[in-house]
């Protein structure tokens, strides 16, 4: 591994960690292109590597949010579990659809979610959600992420805030629980594809992501819930715009 590759892995890992720790999402959306375009693995290996990186980083960030009481455990587990089967079913259908169409579809869904985050809340935020509502929202998100292939964290936070009415800080922590469950489930399904991974890249990338997640959480604690919600929405709009450009150019 060259010194340049090491620096790129550390910088990219720090950015992924900052997103997960501070915004509760964006791990795979950022990690996969960083690995593919900057560090050279094949797209399939990049996806498997990103799942490893995101799983470890999310568990670390989740521990910090849980310590502060910002995780709705029941809601998060129901939300994640309800999305697994729909994600598998729609994921199979996604193989038959054009990748450009899927990328544009994700960008449109992400933009809609971001606009919703910028609107004032319709009701006071609560600490947890009803089980049936949490399961229904999780199933819907699972179907969307299975079909589009990305966006679990970036779409989970808007769903937790706008649909399940969780406070922003609690939504961020709960999103990390959802990401952890989904990443571990996806990684288990891809366990046989890990033989050819470049651990010399994955190890420093993951280490930097873990440190970045703690730093992201520390910065997020200084901001109000409304400020975090607006920052998240603007970042989501930027990601959506970049994905549209990448799809059509």
Image (tube, helix red, strand yellow):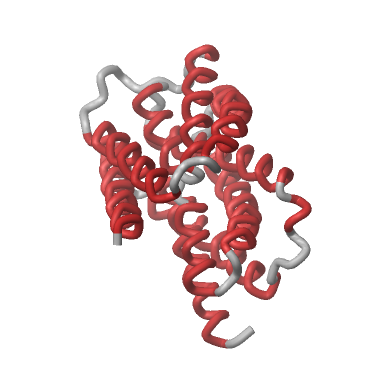
Front position in the image: 43 or 39:
43
- Residue at point 62%, 47% (across, down): 59
Viewed as shown, does residue 6 lie left or right of 144? Answer: right
In the image, residue 58 lies at what x, y percent?
58, 48
In the image as oriented, which residue stretches furthest toward the bottom?
A: 3
In the image, residue 180 lies at what x, y percent?
61, 42
Q: Is residue 13 visible?
A: yes
Front position in the image: 196 or 89:
89
Q: In which quarter of the image is the C terminus?
A: bottom left
Front position in the image: 55 or 108:
108
- Residue at point 53%, 28% (across, down): 72
- Residue at point 47%, 18% (across, down): 129
- Residue at point 54%, 74% (across, down): 39
* 21 shown above or below 159: below
Viewed as shown, does residue 74 lie left or right of 199? Answer: left
In the image, residue 113 lies at what x, y percent?
32, 35
Viewed as shown, does residue 79 lie left or right of 30? Answer: right
In the image, residue 224 lies at what x, y percent?
30, 41
Q: Can residue 216 be seen in this view?
A: no
* 2 shown above or below 18: below
* 59 shown above or below 3: above
Q: Quadrant of the N terminus?
A: bottom right
Front position in the image: 30 or 174:
30
Q: Count how many numbered circles sit on residues in the image.
A: 0
Viewed as shown, does residue 101 lie left or right of 29? Answer: left
């Amino acid at each position: 591994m060259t010194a340049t590759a090491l620096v790129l892995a550390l910088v990219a890992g720090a950015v992924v960690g900052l997103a997960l720790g501070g915004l509760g999402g964006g791990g795979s959306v950022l990690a996969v292109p960083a690995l593919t375009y900057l560090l050279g693995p094949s797209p399939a290996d990049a996806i498997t590597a990103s799942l490893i990186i995101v799983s470890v980083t999310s568990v670390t960030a989740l521990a910090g949010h849980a310590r502060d009481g910002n995780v709705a455990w029941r809601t998060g587990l129901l939300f994640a579990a309800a999305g697994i089967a729909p994600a598998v079913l729609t994921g199979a259908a996604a193989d038959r659809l054009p990748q450009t169409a899927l990328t544009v579809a994700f960008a449109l869904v992400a933009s809609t979610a971001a606009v919703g985050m910028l609107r004032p809340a319709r009701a006071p935020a609560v600490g947890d959600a009803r089980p049936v509502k949490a399961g229904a929202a999780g199933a819907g998100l699972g179907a969307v992420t299975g079909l589009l292939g990305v966006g679990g964290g970036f779409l989970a936070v808007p769903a937790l805030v706008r649909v399940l009415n969780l406070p922003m800080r609690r939504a961020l922590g709960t999103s990390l629980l959802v990401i952890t469950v989904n990443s571990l489930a996806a990684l288990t399904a891809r366990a046989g594809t890990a033989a050819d991974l470049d651990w010399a890249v994955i190890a420093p990338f993951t280490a930097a992501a873990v440190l970045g997640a703690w730093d992201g959480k520390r910065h997020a604690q200084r901001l109000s819930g409304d400020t975090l919600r607006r920052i998240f929405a603007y970042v989501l709009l930027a990601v959506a715009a970049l994905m549209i450009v990448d799809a059509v150019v």
